[in-house]
Image (spheres, grey):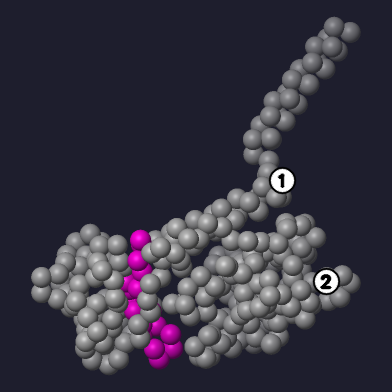
Amino acid sequence: MNRFIFSFCMIAFLLDLFSDATAQVAPRNYKEEIATWDKERLASLKSATGWVNLAGLYWLKSGENPFGSDPSNALVFQHPSFPAQLGSFLLTDKEVIWKTAVGQTVLEKNKPFDQGVIFQLDSMRSLSLAYKTFRWSIIKREQLIGVRFRDLANPALDALKKIDRFPVSRNWVLEAEFIPSLVPTITTTNILGQSYQQPHPGKIRFVIDGKTYQLDVVDEGEPDEYHIVFGDATNGNDTYESGRFIDIPKPDANGKTIIDFNKAYNPPCAFSEFSTCPIPTKANTLSISISAGEKKVH
């Protein structure tokens, strides 16, 4: 009997230890998970590479594009901390060259950058240059070459305290069936009216209130996720008028995945007029209200 009691006590002790260890690594409850997701999302938006600090978007013309606060420049950014002429962008048929104006100091990785190639047109990678709290790099949108300009002291950063959302509910966490695509790409259109092709691995099919819906997914190069641009009946009322985004796990070996509409989020255009967002296709515009995820920003 004593041996039995001792064994029982040892088992109970080990179970307690296991329970304590499990509690430390067990997932928090779902609402806490979403609260953490919201916090990380807000921090990302307000980071140095986020969307909230955008202060300008300038499309370059072929040749010299002087840049500064003086209205005589081709590219004008009026700000008390910005010089009359900071420098210029030279757009050729192969590259973008930056030239710093005499007497000014522009940095690249904390080192003075007087002149050099910052973007090649056959690439999507750009150097990032800095002046005081300002940062800029080059973006390419089909035939358009532009300057994405940021202010790390942008007042919008302090103004954005939170992003309103619908009440969190597990009812919006849905199992979905992945259906492989028969075509390799899908046409996406952005707010500039440009259309371009994106990798289209397939679509997902899911059920809401007994009715089946489906959404096309695109592959943006993330190792574990697919991306969806979708619209629904809340757009323009509770949510951003041009739709929202959502990311889903890539399907498992049985072609199953999960779409969690509580993690539907606003596109960059909801936070800045200086962004170029894709808009939902007709096929990805749902007829019902998805009362989950982020609401529009006020």
Q: Which mark is residue 29?
A: 1
Give how far across and how far down residue 23 sits, in percent. Answer: 69, 35
Q: Residue at the far front: name it.
A: 80
Which of the 4 image quarters holds residue 278?
bottom right
Q: Residue at x 73, y 58 (%)?
A: 167
Q: Quadrant of the N terminus?
A: top right
Q: Which residue is mark 2?
A: 207
Q: Residue at x 72, y 30 (%)?
A: 19
Residue 108 visible in the snapshot = no
Please, is residue 157 above or below residue 3 in the view?
A: below
Q: Residue at x 58, y 68 (%)?
A: 297
For the residue pair 47 and 55, the one nearer the viewer reads as: 55
Which of the 4 image quarters holds residue 179?
bottom right
Q: How many marks?
A: 2
Q: Is residue 151 magenta?
A: yes
Please, is residue 252 above or below residue 181 in the view?
A: above
* In the image: residue 100, left or right of residue 75: left
Q: Which mark is residue 285?
A: none
Mark 2 neighbour density, 10 Å: few (under 14) some (14–19) many (20 or more): few
Q: Which marked residue is nearer to the observer: mark 2 or mark 1? A: 1
Q: Is residue 264 magenta?
A: no
| Residue type at numbered disc 2 | Val
Mark 1 neighbour density, 10 Å: few (under 14) some (14–19) many (20 or more): few
